[in-house]
């Protein structure tokens, strides 16, 4: 199967200035390669600070100004340049950002989801997207400050999937949601994949990755240390890297009986 997204030897470096004029590059992501296939959920699992959000932002060319990026990103067979990413973002390719501050505080939710469109089709899609995530039509008339954290999360997700994107990058999409709500949302990601989208699901939570993903990439300090089918984390077999094996042993279900 042809990947919908290919990341090739991606490196992200920050310049750090020392005494006088000395400058050293600190690499946050080093020579990372990965693919996301249509119809599949690919999870990236890594602890806090391992470079997961930088990966998400690099794909969309949304890195902070002091970051340098090397490597190539292909979307649907062609290089995903900054310009192409800007054109496709919010339509064919969609980012669910980690922070809910990405919602516009001055604009009602309905308007944000419809992105200015007022036609009947857009209104219907908006209502359906909210409903899919357990939000009623009254939410359209609300401003972000009127939403609870969990509602704001679900609005971000609804907004990201409203136009049936072909690639969804979800950066820790479920913090602040209880286990049931989180599982339900991950179920929706599986559905979106079944409908043909490629999903890149970024999380620090291996249990969630196991529940949702077909393939799991283990990320440590900006490097990919392992890539295995999700079932390897069910049994613990086929985990080639000691760090993956340690993560597996740390899962509550694998704790030794006392
Ligand atoms: N704007 C920045 N300037 C300098 N360093 C940064 C910046 N953003 C992130 N980093 C560094 O890159 C590393 C990875 O960050 P991030 O991708 O946010 O981690 P994660 O999402 O896995 O928690 C962090 O250790 C952080 O120190
Ligand atoms: Mg992050």
Image (spheres, rainbow, N blue to C red):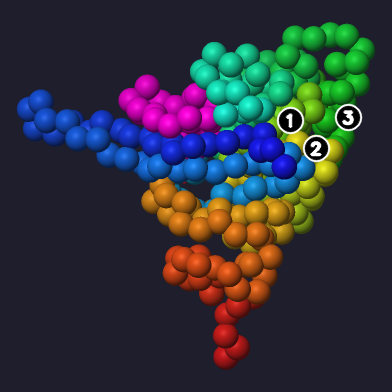
Q: Nearer the viewer, residue 179 or 85?
A: 85
Q: CA distance from mark 3 to mark 2?
A: 19 Å
Whole-percent x, y for residue 146 in the image: 70, 29
Whichever of labels 3 and 1 marks the residue nearer the N terminus, that label is 3
Q: Is residue 231 magenta?
A: no
Q: Up-down: is 224 above or below 147? A: below
Point out which mark residue 99 bears: none
Whole-percent x, y for residue 133 in the image: 81, 39
Whichever of labels 1 and 2 marks the residue nearer the N terminus, that label is 1
Whole-percent x, y for residue 7 in the image: 53, 36
Residue at 44% from the left image edge and 36% from the top image edge: 10
Whole-percent x, y for residue 155 in the image: 73, 32
Q: Nearer the viewer, residue 64 or 102?
A: 64
Whichever of labels 3 and 2 marks the residue nearer the N terminus, that label is 3
Residue at 69% from the left image edge and 38% from the top image edge: 2
Left or right of residue 83: residue 138: right
Q: CA distance from mark 3 to mark 1?
A: 18 Å
Q: Which residue is mark 1?
A: 166
Q: Secondary structure at mark 1?
A: loop
Q: CA distance from mark 1 to mark 2?
A: 7 Å
The answer to the question of whether label 1 and label 2 lie on touching residues, with beta carbons closer than 8 A, is: yes
């Amino acid at each position: 199967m042809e990947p919908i997204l290919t990341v090739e030897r991606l490196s992200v470096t920050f310049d750090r200035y020392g005494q006088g004029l000395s400058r050293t590059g600190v690499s946050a992501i080093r020579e990372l390669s990965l693919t996301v296939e249509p119809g599949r959920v690919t999870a990236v699992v890594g602890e806090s600070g391992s470079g997961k959000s930088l990966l998400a932002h690099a794909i969309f060319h949304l890195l902070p100004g002091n970051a340098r990026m090397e490597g190539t990103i292909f979307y649907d067979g062609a290089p995903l340049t900054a310009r192409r990413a800007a054109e496709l973002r919010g339509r064919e390719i969609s980012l669910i950002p980690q922070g809910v501050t990405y919602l516009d505080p001055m604009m009602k939710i309905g308007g944000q989801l419809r992105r200015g469109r007022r036609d009947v089709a857009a209104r219907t899609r908006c209502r359906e997207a909210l409903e899919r995530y357990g939000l009623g039509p009254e939410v359209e008339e609300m401003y972000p400050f009127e939403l609870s954290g969990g509602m704001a999360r679900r609005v971000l997700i609804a907004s990201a999937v409203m136009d049936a994107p072909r690639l969804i990058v979800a950066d820790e999409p479920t913090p602040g949601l209880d286990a049931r709500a989180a599982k339900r949302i991950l179920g929706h990601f599986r559905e979106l994949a079944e409908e043909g989208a490629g999903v890149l699901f970024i999380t620090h939570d291996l249990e969630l990755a196991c529940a949702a993903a077909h393939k799991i990439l283990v990320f440590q300090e900006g490097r990919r240390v392992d890539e295995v089918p999700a079932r390897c984390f069910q049994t613990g077999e086929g985990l080639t890297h000691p760090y993956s094996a340690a993560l597996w042993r740390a899962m509550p279900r694998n704790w030794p009986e006392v």
